[in-house]
Amino acid sequence: MLNKKLLTLCASVALAFAAQAAEPVKPAATVNGVKIGAEVLELLVANNVAQGGKDTPELRAALKGELIAREVLAQEAKKQKLDQDPSVKVQLLLQQNALLADTLIAKETPKFNKSDDKLRAEYKRQSDLLADAEEYQVSHIVSATEADAKAVIKAAKDGQAFDKLAREKSISPSAQKGGSLGWLMGNQINPALFNVIVNLSEGGVTSMPIATPEGWQAIRLDGKRKFKVPSFDDSKQQLVNAVFANERAEFVQKLVKAAKVEQ
């Protein structure tokens, strides 16, 4: 299937075919006189291989069939002047700009600074930000109504086991684990819940239900501890992703600042 991942793959595949442009290449197919270039088929094959597929005759036949069907549909759409529809024109423009933007980023990526020093600087920055961070071990019971949630809280306050109540009463998938959500950072918790959790003592249960999109919730704080920052080696891939995102943002911002923008 054609999908958004195809856009980000275009740059590298297109460069590979540019070197072969001088030699005539037999089209993958011709539909009503319109040629479907072999490079288009190769692009789809490469996209599927990049996602874990295998380059087989069966895959190529299926993709060629899809290309032919899409060309037939596109020709019929043009015959019906659907390409002149304003909303279609806008979508085509957006897709074209997205492709060009992704191709430019792919071209510039090798120039981004992803050195070990850069990664270690990012590691230090993130470690400093997390120096005082805490993790919370949380369990919850989700009820469909406020009345049900209040009944659950009363039962917990009266001494009934919270995990047993969760298994019997909660409508959340976490019921199978006794309502346990494991260890969470503050930014991983719904703000409405976190504002209550930080004021609970370990083992404490909320005195009133909390309304959330998931339902009415009763919360128990099972534990609290200082967040342990993972080692540099264990964080390597996340650091690469963070540095890439920062470098990309700086590159884009540089271009935006240099552009003449009127609003």
Image: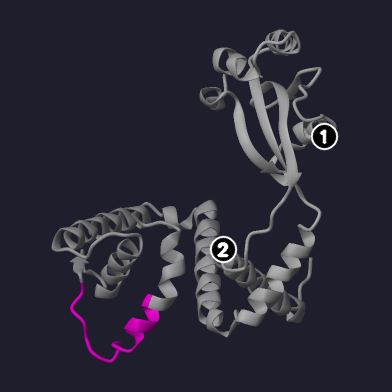
What amino acid is found at the position of numbered circle 1 in the picture? Asn
Q: Is residue 142 left or right of residue 132?
A: left
Q: How many discs appear?
A: 2
Visible in this render: residue 193?
yes
Scheme of image coloration: one colour
Residue 231 coordinates in the image, percent (x, y): 62, 64
Which residue is at 77% across, 37% downward?
191
What amino acid is found at the position of numbered circle 2 in the picture? Asp
Question: Which corner quadrant holds the C terminus?
Answer: bottom right
Visible in this render: residue 186?
no
Magenta stretch: helix, strand or loop mostly: loop
Residue 225 coordinates in the image, percent (x, y): 74, 44
Which residue is at 73% across, 46% downward?
187
Q: Nearer the viewer, residue 5 or 137?
A: 137
Where 133 sits versus 215, above or below? below
Q: Nearer the viewer, residue 249 or 175?
A: 175
Residue furthest out toward the left: 57
Q: Which residue is mark 2?
A: 234
Q: Which residues are magenta?
A: 13-27
Q: Is residue 196 left or right of residue 175?
A: right
Assign a secondary structure to mark 2: loop
Confirm or deny contact between disc 2 and disc 1 (CB under 8 A): no
Which residue is at 20% across, 70% downward?
28
- Cα gap from disc 2 to disc 1, whole angstroms: 31 Å
Label number found at residue 195: 1
Where 66 sits versus 140, above or below? below
Tell me the quarter of the picture where residue 22 sits: bottom left
Assign a secondary structure to mark 1: helix
First in sequence: mark 2 vs mark 1: 1
Q: Is residue 109 left or right of residue 25?
A: right
